[in-house]
Amino acid sequence: MASPSSDLDRERRKCTFNVAELTDIINGGREKTERRQYLESLVLNEPIFNYDDYYFLSREEKYSDAVKKTVRLVQVLKQHNIEDPEDYQTLLKYVLNLNLPIALHNSMFRPTIRDQGTDEQRKKWLPLANDYKIIGTYAQTELGHGTFIRGLETTSTYDPKREEFVLNTPTLTATKWWPGCLGKTSTHAVVMAQLYIKNQCYGIHSFIIQLRSLKDHSPMPGVTVGDIGNKVGLETNDNGFLAMDNVRIPRENMLMRHAQVYPDGTYRKPANSKLVYGTMVLLRATVVSESATNLSKAATIAIRYSCVRRQTEAKPGELEPQIIDYVTQQHKLVPQLATAYAFAWIARYMMSTYHALHADIESGHLGALQELHGISSGLKAFTAEMSVSGIEVCRRACGGHGFSAASGLVSMYKDRLPSCTYEGENTVLYLQTARFLLKCFRQPSITPSSMSYIQVKPLPGARWGVKSPEDLMKPILLVEAFEHRAQRTIKSAAQFLESQISQGLDTSEAMNRSGIEFVRCAKAHCYYFVTRNFFQSTALLKCSKEIKESLLTLGVVFALNGIADNSGEFLEDCFITGTQMEFVRERILYCYKQLRPNLVGLVDAFAFADQSLNSALGAYDGDVYNRLYNWAKRAPLNKTDVHSSYHKYLKPILKSKI
Ligand SMILES: CCCCCC(=O)SCCNC(=O)CCNC(=O)[C@H](O)C(C)(C)COP(=O)(O)OP(=O)(O)OC[C@H]1O[C@@H](n2cnc3c(N)ncnc32)[C@H](O)[C@@H]1OP(=O)(O)O
Ligand SMILES: Cc1cc2nc3c(=O)[nH]c(=O)nc-3n(C[C@H](O)[C@H](O)[C@H](O)COP(=O)(O)OP(=O)(O)OC[C@H]3O[C@@H](n4cnc5c(N)ncnc54)[C@H](O)[C@@H]3O)c2cc1C
């Protein structure tokens, strides 16, 4: 058998481009790479951030270990004056390999205060939160409602005599359920509740509630709080429940940047009722980025392993091939790699669009709200869905060892799975994007320039301009196919809705009956958007010819697999012919061959530290078998040669007389 590490060495020598150059491109420039390396150096050298035996820990141990790591992380951040949220994101993405029990503090609690608090509220709460003197979460979802926010039952009733709000959980179903870091860690929460003043309900608003004593962490009077129990994954996170019984907070604890309650109980409504949903939009944009990162990690593990793993001699006596040389294996993994790259670029687009539109909103241009919501909802759902299914493809592609926790892919899959549910269930979000697409379809005036394609009506009888397999290397033709599909499915969803209404259904029933068409067009739009963005952005890069070629080929793989996997949608109006579909399949194989020498280089370029992959199969040196063996030897069951269950149970039957 060939040595696994020499297999990877050989792969690295075959690579046609400079991996460090591509790493800089992925990071967004040399300076960003250096910053990332600096941040890595602060954390990776600390034994406390070692994850070697993480997969052996129980749920409780995992939570406790995560708290320990979190506290040390906070100390490191303070010690080195690291305050930039981008640095924190970099650490989460590339260095740490766990969901922190303060995740919600940084991703939702602080941003909600920043975006929904007045200047005085920011001044009061943000220094405490930034300094981790308090730890907060975002408590919105209840036992009875997650999706339908307007249906939340928690109440916050204004008492003008004492200038206080009184928070209550009036029913079992009003109990807050799921918020991350709520069960055991957080001292405070932004709680979303129905605002009542003089018996009138004004809808959902945000309130800051103290959950636990800052002296001894015990629950505050009237607060019942705890962990919701074991889940599929996210074992380090104490997703929690919360019930409140006449919990009083000062009037100043309602976040009043957009809506205000004055001391006498006078209410001033926000300029737009959806401003209160702002933090969710930010998180949806972040999910796009996390989906990209995690799929990149999974592809790194599975591709390195597939270059090391050898199976089934082709001819007697010959060295068994590396499994990556089976085209079926390439057909599993290369599309995941291509998707990871396409997502890395759409994530960058999503974050910059978020910041630009958020700035517009802050300066009073509220029209940007629906654009941002329309774009971010679909992209969150699309990237989460493809990333999660891609991670599972990578896991299975590792065969038996993919089922071992040591692969790193099992926990990755389990921890990413809820990204399809949290921050807006995917179907629900696709439906929101579809609503926006249909609105743009009908009203050119509200259509953002990035979506102006919707205004171009697809010509009946339009045909794809591809004449040969070589034409499939032309981004313009690939983007055209996705654009056509998106235009056609949006138009068809609009027509379907109209047909339902013309049959006499009321709007909500007609919308419900059109749901499948809506989701179809939202997915088609997202595929188009991601493909177009990848080709447009990578075409502008100043880099070596070899890197450009590899990126172009990855883009072609992403696009062609999208066409092959959704072939019915391109064939049903004869836009693509059967012959062109044969070209597609042929070109996919061609691209795999082109990319084959560079596969390890393309995953090395993500530059994940071994610690952040925490995988016996995917480490940089490829020393898979030693890692698996040494890891298994450390398993708790192997602490003794004879297990205690032998003495308790096995021995009596083994010793009993037949
Ligand atoms: C690390 C993990 C952390 C995880 C943290 C969490 O999960 S925190 C919890 C996350 N929870 C969620 O994401 C809940 C998901 N649910 C929602 O966001 C929302 O309830 C919903 C979008 C589905 C529907 O909201 P509503 O019922 O208020 O809205 P409704 O259906 O009446 O739509 C009214 C109009 O508002 C628009 N609208 C809805 N949300 C909007 C938003 N954030 N920004 C701008 N506009 C928005 C709609 O497009 C629609 O426009 P038009 O009428 O013009 O078409
Ligand atoms: C790991 C995890 C962490 C979370 N963290 C937090 C947190 O920190 N804070 C917080 O407040 N919440 C949190 N949540 C809650 C999360 O945001 C909700 O679970 C999510 O928004 C989905 O809502 P739901 O559970 O009500 O699902 P449901 O809406 O009940 O969905 C069930 C099914 O019904 C369908 N459905 C529902 N409504 C519609 C509709 N209008 N049209 C068509 N189909 C529909 C869905 O598509 C889905 O198939 C978390 C959840 C998880 C799993």
Image (cartoon, rainbow, N blue to C red):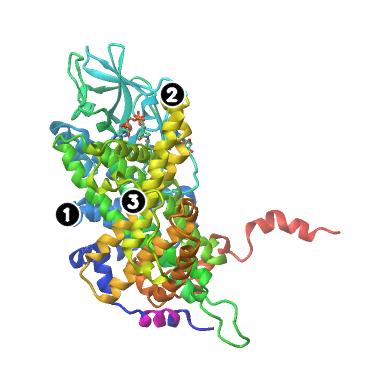
The residue tagged with tag 2: helix, strand or loop? loop
Q: Which residues are magenta?
A: 7-14
* Residue 309 in view in this figure: yes
Quadrant of picture, ligand 1: top left
Question: In the rendered structure, which disc, 3 or 2, sits on the residue that comes first in sequence?
Answer: 3
Quadrant, the C terminus: bottom right
Residue behind mark 1: 81
Q: Is residue 102 above or below residue 341?
A: above
- Tell me the kind of residue under disc 1: Asn
- Which is nearer the eye, 188 or 257? 257
Find the residue positioned furthest to the bottom.
317
User: Does residue 96 show up?
Assistant: no
8 in magenta: yes
Horizontal placement of 50 versus 302: left or right? left
User: Can you tell which quarter of the image residue 334 is in?
Assistant: bottom left
Per the model, the C-alpha gap separating discs 1 and 2 is 58 Å
- Closer-to-camera residue (411/244): 411
1 vs 2, front mark: 2
Coordinates of residue 314 in the picture (x, y in percent): 59, 82
Q: Residue at x 25, y 65 (%)?
A: 539
Marker disc for residue 288:
3
Q: Residues within 10 Å of mark 1 (few under 14, many from 20)?
A: few
Report the amino acid beneath label 2. Asp
Q: Position of residue 40 (x, y in %)?
A: 27, 63
Can you identify the residue that label 2 sits on?
506
- Label 3 – label 2 distance at C-alpha: 35 Å
Is ligand 1 within 8 Å of the beta carbon of the residue shown at mark 3? Answer: no
Say above or below: 407 vs 260: below
Q: In this rendering, is residue 69 above or below 600?
A: above
Give coordinates of residue 565: x percent, y percent.
48, 57
